[in-house]
Image (cartoon, rainbow, N blue to C red):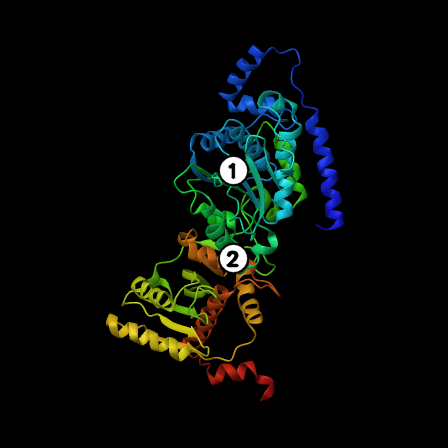
Amino acid sequence: MKPADKRAFQIWEEHHRAFIAAVTPDPSETAADKQTRLKRLEANPEAWFEYYFPKYAKYQPAAFHKKATKRLLNYPRWYETRSWSRGFAKSTRTMFETIYMALTGKIQNILLVSYSWDNAARLLLPYMLNLELNQRIVNDYGRQMNPGQWVSGEFTTRYGISFTAVGAGQSPRGSKKEQVRPDMIIVDDIDTDEECRNEKRIQDKWEWIEQALIPTVDISENMRILFCGNIIAKDCCIVRAQQHADFVDVVNLVDAKGQSMWPQKNKPEDIAYIQSKISYISFQKEYMNNPLSVGTVFPELIYDKMRPLKDYRLLVCYTDPSFRDTKKNDYKATVLVGLFKGCYHVIKAFVEQTTTANMIAWHYQVMNLVGDDQACYYLMESNFIQDILMQEFFKVGEAAGRMVPIRGDDRKKLDKFTRIESLLEPLNRTAKLIFNEAERNNPHMQRLEDQFKAFQPGSRAHDDGPDAVEGAVWFLNHKARDMAPATFVSRNITRKQNKHRY
């Protein structure tokens, strides 16, 4: 830890020590009254939280807080993700629940995991200080501090309850305490903005979670796995965890009608104020679990209803293939674009990191969509593996008894950014590039939109979808020009227009 960070950590620890030490029990309470009160509190977790953590409970909990606690306490084998808006007490509420379960005998071995060990230790510090200094806890559950096993980041109570901080990528394999494997894994603040810009780093971290962290539990015993974190990117560990969770809890600052989701804390004027102080993109990311990465070229796309296919003067199916047949490289992109009264309609899109076989299958879907009575041109961006890809199309066509009439786009191209910006930006700005409203929620069309919005100079985001649209629009332009009938002007009209020459 850097000296400046270490000093900040010490200041934060001193603040919490003073904060927690102010919580004292009633000295006049009898032993019988104490037992009656303790029994009542343990039967009501919300009252338990309010009694032992009065300094934290500044605002009454919302309905979503209470529901989340019931799920976690009532299901001893449970996997949940909590993507609550910033400021919704994800870490604090989790601490309440974890200490409650630890002191009432429901869990014994807790791992708190974050993007780094330092951050995990910082998040775990309030647990240690409450168990050590909160006199209401000490009064009711005994002295918890265990000399010799009481250091920041890893400590065990006198009653054998262990707490361990783990940074992403560190080995958690030694987390077994005596015969007890971890029975509570808290993954808090695991994603970072920097890492979410690199798919490889997210994949490596997720593999560590699935292959090293989660297998520390005993599959035959109770286990609770809880992910806490905002959705800060379309691909991040929280999003991946949602695919496996027993329950996905996404709570935004406001609901679909704009009403506060924690009205006991956030009033309409509070929400309006913060909205006025930050950008729409930042507000969506931090408070609405809706990460947007918008560039400067295509900040918005236009969606509308498409015409029947027979109405299009020309149809083009254009493909931008990635160079390698692997899910770790570029996206493959195939788009069907039609020309109607000077507008370019993106009717169908396939954008995915996938295999060549799947890419070829997209073309058969397009052929089935277009039908046999409608003309459609099929093109593919040329690259050094074009011949290999063409052979694959031919093999599939022979087996299917139906060939995709695809050919390469052999034009000499400018650099990708210049091509896409110069051709498509004016069309988008003048509402002549239109995307299919009926496909708006299709993951492929969403990926295409994401790539358009992320498109900007110097961006390292994928742009294979916009590149395919550029190829289709370019071909439509040139084909339409070639198909335009020749215009003949009579000699007499020419003479009248140029009479000064005669």
6 to 439, vertically: above or below: above
Q: Position of residue 314 (x, y in %)?
A: 39, 69
For label 1, the residue is 109
- Seen as rendered, the residue at the extreme left is 401
The answer to whether residue 279 shows anywhere in this view is no
Q: Which mark is residue 204?
A: 2
Q: Position of residue 113 (x, y in %)?
A: 56, 45
Q: Secondary structure at mark 2?
A: helix
Q: Quadrant of the C terminus?
A: bottom right
The quadrant holding residue 349 is: bottom left
Instruction: Give the residue at x 50% y 64%.
Output: 466
> Which numbered disc, 1 or 2, marks the residue that appears first in the sequence?
1
274 to 420, vertically: above or below: above
Instruction: Give the residue at x 45% y 57%.
Output: 435
Q: Which mark lies nearer to you, 1 or 2?
A: 1
The quadrant holding residue 456 is: bottom right
**Residue neighbourhood size for the residue with mark 1, other residues' Cα within 10 Å, grouped as few (<14), some (14–19), many (≥20):** many
- The residue type indicated by label 2 comes to Asp
On the picture, is 22 further left or further right than 208? right
